[in-house]
Image (cartoon, rainbow, N blue to C red):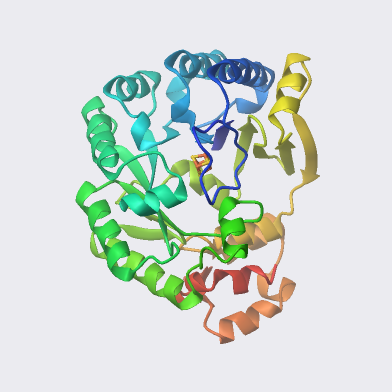
Amino acid sequence: MKGIYVHIPFCRVICTYCDFIKEVAKPKRHRRYVEALCREIAMAADRLNGATTLYLGGGTPSLLDDDDLRLIFDAIAEVILPASLQEVTIEANPEDITEAKAALFKRLGINRVSLGVQTFHPDALRFLRRTHEPADVFQAVLRLQTAGIMNINLDLIFALPNQTMAELRHDLDEIVRLDPTHVSAYSLIVEEGTRLKTLIDQGEVTPADEDTEADMFNAVIDTLTTHGYTHYEISNFAKPSCESAHNRMYWENREYVGLGVGAHGHEGNRRLLNTPRVKDYLERLENHTSPVVADDPDEGIKDTLIMGLRLREGVSLKTMHTRHGVDVFTHYPALEKARDNGLIEVVKGNLRLTHKGMLLGNEVFMIF
Ligand code: SF4
């Protein structure tokens, strides 16, 4: 099992909270980037062998025009059998999903779409600088389903500044009404270098406090699990058989190849990183040079634990022993204290976060 991640760094506007690698660029730049990406795909042909999942993330991949998307999928089909890809996901903004775009996704073999919904409150959407209206989400889901794409993830952000519990409950009601197969729900994180951080530093915005965030996270968990979703990863919820196979590869610390600007990969026992600057990425590929700028040894034990503990079932202690040759409690003695404090537990041979540990995950992750 192996995954392919493809990064598309373009966005229509830059969201208030975003620290991903992205830029606002003209379509001409999109084509130049796509051509460079296709070159990287061809160069990576051997490394892509055996891939079973493909994930186009960003940025906003749905922003690309039809020909650009076709070029990417054609380049991938040149090096691997499209039929070997069991899960093909694209991240999309709701306003990009026209009937024609949904039909194109289907023709390209995309069978999972992750929609950046975030909230159903128009004022909050404007504050976040999202460019859709709540009604666009309903239309997008309907168009995707009509095109035959039933596996749909909705991204939700909670603990927004001044958000009330009633507003979050409205967001959750709308999500439940749409009945997607998967929901990713994240609390708003204040990242350095974002407009959100500036607004907070200037005193114009007050972030949600920790208690509000915890209450909201509990409301998200309660609502979604009551409506048939399994809480299988700290921030992810799925209907039966609809967990994200691609993201599971990250959480299980398996292999994936990262393509595109700033993309990370995990290949063999190496961690690879592509150049994070679009200009540098373009120049390297146009000169037939690898975009990889960092090639570090896998941190093995630490990565397997940090990623695996995000999953509800946690990490198999037996696997830690056979894969990394360690007893984790001996390797990290501080885990005993976390167990005494009710943050972690061992259930059926798996080390996992408790409910309290899910709320206070960082206290556990700091141990590593
Ligand atoms: S659309 Fe996504 S990647 Fe682009 S600015 Fe907004 S959050 Fe960032």
In this view, the residue in front, 310 or 193, is 193
- Quadrant assignment for the N terminus: top right
In this view, the residue in front, 307 or 321, is 307
Q: Residue furthest bottom?
A: 340
Residue 155 visible within the image:
no
Identify the residue at image location x=72%, y=43%.
271
In this view, the residue in front, 252 or 247, is 247
- Residue 302, position in %: x, y? 69, 60
Identify the residue at image location x=51%, y=64%.
205
Image position of 189 with respect to 15: above or below: below
Q: Quadrant of residue 212?
A: bottom left
Image position of 147 with respect to 173: above or below: above
- Residue 152, position in %: x, y? 33, 40
- Residue 266, position in %: x, y? 67, 41
Q: Quadrant of residue 296?
A: top right
Image position of 122 with respect to 11: above or below: below
Residue 360 visible within the image:
yes
Horizontal side of residue 196 vs 266, given as left or right: left
Horizontal side of residue 202 vs 296, given as left or right: left
In this view, the residue in front, 74 or 352, is 74
